[in-house]
Image (cartoon, helix red, strand yellow):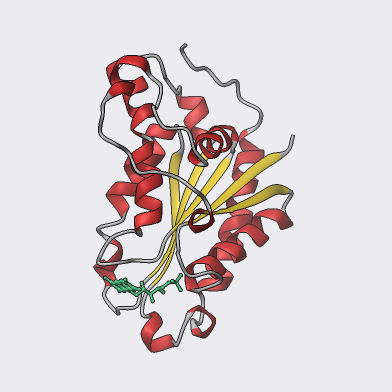
Amino acid sequence: MSITVLGISGSPRRHGNTETLLDRFLEGAASTGGVVNKVVLKDLHYRSCQGCNACHKTGVCVLTDDFTPLFEEIRTADVLALSSPIYSMGITAELKALIDRAQVYWAQKFVLKTLYFDYEHIKRHKGVFISTAGQNWDHVFNGAFPIVTAFFNDMGFEYRDNVIANNMDEYGGIRGHPTALDAAYKKGRMVVKEVIAFGDAPVTTKD
Ligand SMILES: Cc1cc2nc3c(=O)[nH]c(=O)nc-3n(C[C@H](O)[C@H](O)[C@H](O)COP(=O)(O)O)c2cc1C
């Protein structure tokens, strides 16, 4: 059974603190058999949600762009690692744009009631949030957590864990952090092992 692991990089800065942490997570996931892919949002062409609410009636987004195939990839991933640095106490515009575009799945679930993920499905689909922040505040990630929770819920993933590292300003970047890169690698391994251990449970969605 191959476990697909999709890493989404929401940082506009290539190979910065957050993408480096994501890469380490993906290396850990690959080391235990995960089939890994990384998508960098800043390289994609997309529009933000128009708030037209057409999806509430049709279950389909009116926009077709690079997010369209990305959502298909998200829906077939076993593990989804969402990453974003903290910008202005929240996530980046890039990741927020993706999450807002998931409104179509919210509409399918809660308005049209055509989409349903059962317990087994959610337990074998793991979501991990990866983030870094400059400040030395324990609560600096608190603005991001509810947004990520909403996305994992809409997409049928269990919000399994965080890989977060603050105080980047003092450490001089992620490579100066004493534990974060190691922790990311270990969590990448852990999550893939958990999905393997869960087995090939049947997936039920209502059409
Ligand atoms: C526009 C902008 C806003 C930021 N806002 C915050 C913030 O509110 N709190 C914080 O702790 N760090 C903030 N930072 C610092 C970044 O979160 C931090 O440097 C992070 O590690 C950058 O990740 P990256 O290298 O992946 O871009 C901000 C940085 C930028 C560029």
x and y, in percent, of residue 53 in the image: 26, 26
Q: Please, is residue 62 above or below residue 38 in the view? A: above
Q: Is residue 191 left or right of residue 88?
A: right
Count of numbered marks: 0
Q: Please, is residue 12 above or below residue 121 in the view? A: below
x and y, in percent, of residue 181 in the image: 56, 72
Name the quarter where the N terminus is drawn: top right
x and y, in percent, of residue 128 in the image: 47, 51
Pick the front one: 12 or 199: 12
Ligand 1 image-quadrant field: bottom left
Q: Please, is residue 46 above or below residue 75 in the view? A: below
Measuring 36% from the left and 47% from the top, which residue is drawn there? Answer: 97
Q: Is residue 173 left or right of residue 49?
A: right
Indicate the quadrant where residue 107 lies. top left
Q: Please, is residue 169 above or below residue 95 in the view? A: below
x and y, in percent, of residue 147 in the image: 30, 48
Indicate the quadrant where residue 203 lies. top right
Pick the front one: 164 or 101: 101
Indicate the quadrant where residue 100 lies. top left
Measuring 59% from the left and 33% from the top, which residue is drawn there? Answer: 76
Residue farthest toward the top in the current orientation of the protein? 207
Measuring 41% from the left and 22% from the top, which residue is drawn there? Answer: 60
Pick the front one: 57 or 16: 57
Q: Is residue 60 left or right of residue 57?
A: right
